[in-house]
Image (cartoon, rainbow, N blue to C red):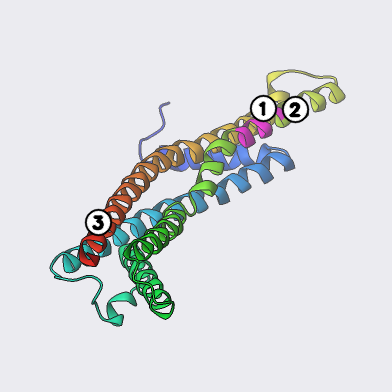
């Protein structure tokens, strides 16, 4: 008799629970660990997407405000206290390095504009590297889940199949009734590994592309900022 459609999801869940219960302890531990990794991966992907979107919004607002200013070097200190915005962090480091070099040059009786610009450019490069690391944070852990989850699932499957055949050999019976629970539990770890890795790889590729785009925009902003500072210093 065919199973009613209303009962099919309930039976499917029950079957998965039964398969999990039939797995050995190693398989259950690996499946549980993969479940934890899945939760972590989804949390990273959601949080990273939200953070990158918010950082880009703040960057565009700050760039728009800066574009309307006639002079960057004469901006008040309040304009350099927005370190949580990547563009503002670059701007603050560059301007502070410029005026710090100017103050040192004034003490020494030097008015070398080239030295000021070099200090500002070096500060820009350091800030750029710092913000790049900020953009790429958590991506390594997500990549580790993408590459490690299938292998962890495969380990559970191989271990479970080996255990199932060892138990069958010890009992002196190798029929399907003896092997099925252990083999099904072993295959569950492979399914769990794939369920973790497949969404994670799509999420990682999307976030990687977003990160690279934001880093390119950051580099372009740093270049434009250096040009404006050079023009204003002449």
The residue that label 3 is drawn on is 227
Q: Residues within 10 Å of mark 3 (few under 14, many from 20)?
A: few
Residue 114 horizontal/vertical position (percent): 34, 61
**Does the CB distance between marks 3 and 1 fall below 8 Å?**
no
Instruction: Give whichever of discs 2 and 3 has the lower sequence position.
Output: 2
**Does the CB distance between marks 1 and 2 fall below 8 Å?**
yes
Residue under the image location 76 percent in, 26 percent down: 162
Residues at marks 3 and 1, CA–CA distance in whole angstroms: 66 Å
Residue 209 appears in the picture as rendered: yes
Number of the label disc, if any, that sits on residue 183:
1
Q: Residue furthest front?
A: 109
State which region is magenta.
151-158
The kind of secondary structure element at disc 2 is helix
Residue 209 horizontal/vertical position (percent): 35, 41
Residue 201 horizontal/vertical position (percent): 45, 37
Residue under the image location 68 percent in, 20 percent down: 176
Say which quadrant the N terminus sits in.
top left
Residue 54 shown left or right of residue 135 in the figure: left
In magenta segment, residue 233: no
Q: Quadrant of residue 208?
A: top left
**Does the CB distance between marks 2 and 3 fall below 8 Å?**
no
The residue that label 2 is drawn on is 164
- As displayed, is residue 50 above or below residue 72? above
Question: Who is closer to the viewer here, 180 or 7?
Answer: 180
Q: Nearer the viewer, mark 3 or mark 1?
A: 3
Q: Quadrant of residue 102?
A: bottom left
Residue under the image location 32 percent in, 61 percent down: 55
- As displayed, is residue 99 above or below residue 234? below
- As displayed, is residue 192 above or below residue 57? above
Q: Quadrant of residue 232?
A: bottom left
């Amino acid at each position: 008799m065919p199973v009613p459609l209303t009962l099919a999801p309930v039976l499917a869940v029950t079957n998965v629970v039964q398969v999990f219960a039939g797995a050995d302890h190693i398989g259950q531990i690996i499946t549980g660990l993969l479940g934890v990794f899945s939760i972590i991966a989804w949390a990273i992907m959601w949080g990273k997407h939200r953070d990158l979107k918010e950082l880009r919004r703040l960057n565009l607002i700050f760039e728009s405000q800066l574009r309307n200013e006639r002079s960057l070097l004469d901006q008040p200190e309040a304009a350099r206290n927005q370190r949580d915005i990547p563009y503002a962090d670059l701007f603050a480091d560059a301007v502070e390095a410029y005026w710090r070099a100017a103050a040192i040059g004034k003490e020494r009786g030097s008015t070398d504009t080239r030295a000021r610009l070099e200090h500002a450019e070096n500060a820009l490069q350091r800030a750029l590297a710092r913000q790049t690391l900020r953009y790429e944070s958590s991506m390594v852990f997500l990549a580790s889940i993408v590459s490690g989850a299938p292998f962890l699932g495969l380990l559970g499957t191989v271990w479970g199949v080996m255990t199932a055949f060892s138990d069958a050999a010890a009992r002196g019976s190798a029929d399907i009734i003896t092997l099925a629970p252990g083999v099904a539990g072993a295959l569950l770890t492979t399914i769990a590994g794939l369920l973790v890795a497949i969404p994670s790889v799509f999420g990682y590729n999307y976030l990687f592309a977003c990160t690279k785009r934001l880093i390119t925009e950051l580099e372009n902003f740093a270049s434009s900022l250096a040009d404006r500072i050079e023009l204003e210093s002449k």
